[in-house]
Image: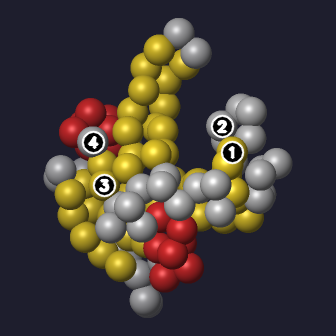
Amino acid sequence: MLKITSLAATKVQEFLQQNGRPEAGLRVRVVGGGCSGFQYQLALDDEAAAGDEVFEQNGVRFFIDPRSHLYLDGTEIDYVDDIMGSGFKFNNPNSTGSCGCGESFQV
């Protein structure tokens, strides 16, 4: 199952409130692309699609399609804010490598 840290959950909830969509959930996908082969994609969604896994953690509702779930199982989403910038960080135990910029990964 996907996990989200309390800080990352707070950031998602703040974003939902700022965009006037407090009831929306977070769609997490793995798509082809980047220099290592796969990329994470986050989007707001109001409802599940057919076949989605839907669950809630730390106050955030998640939607994950079956294909992406294969790559995301055990992944933790965190939020970092440091000198290099701020944003969501994926700690994925299924990843066998990533590109230098950290925007894509291999499995």
Tell me if residue 77 comes above or below residue 84 in the rendering. below
Residue highlighted by disc 3: 3
Task: Tell us which disc is closer to us: 4 or 1.
Answer: 1
Question: Which residue is found at the position 46% from the left and 46% from the top?
Answer: 91
Q: How many marks?
A: 4
Mark 4–mark 3 CB contact (< 8 Å) = yes
Whole-Å distance between the Cαs marked 4 and 3? Answer: 7 Å
Question: Which residue is found at the position 27% from the left and 62% from the top?
Answer: 61
Closer to the chain start, of discs 2 and 3, is 3
Residue highlighted by disc 4: 5
Which amino acid does the dot numbered 1 rest on?
Ser
Closer to the chain start, of discs 4 and 1, is 4
- The local secondary structure at tag 3 comes to strand
Which amino acid does the dot numbered 2 rest on?
Gly
Closer to the chain start, of discs 2 and 4, is 4
Residue 51: name its quadrant. bottom left
| 3 left or right of 73 in image | left
Mark 2–mark 4 CB contact (< 8 Å) = no
Q: Residues within 10 Å of mark 3 (few under 14, many from 20)?
A: many
- The local secondary structure at tag 2 comes to loop
- The local secondary structure at tag 4 comes to loop
Residue highlighted by disc 2: 102
Which amino acid does the dot numbered 3 rest on?
Lys
Mark 1–mark 2 CB contact (< 8 Å) = yes
Q: Residues within 10 Å of mark 1 (few under 14, many from 20)?
A: some
**Most distant residue in the bottom direction:** 50
Residue highlighted by disc 1: 98
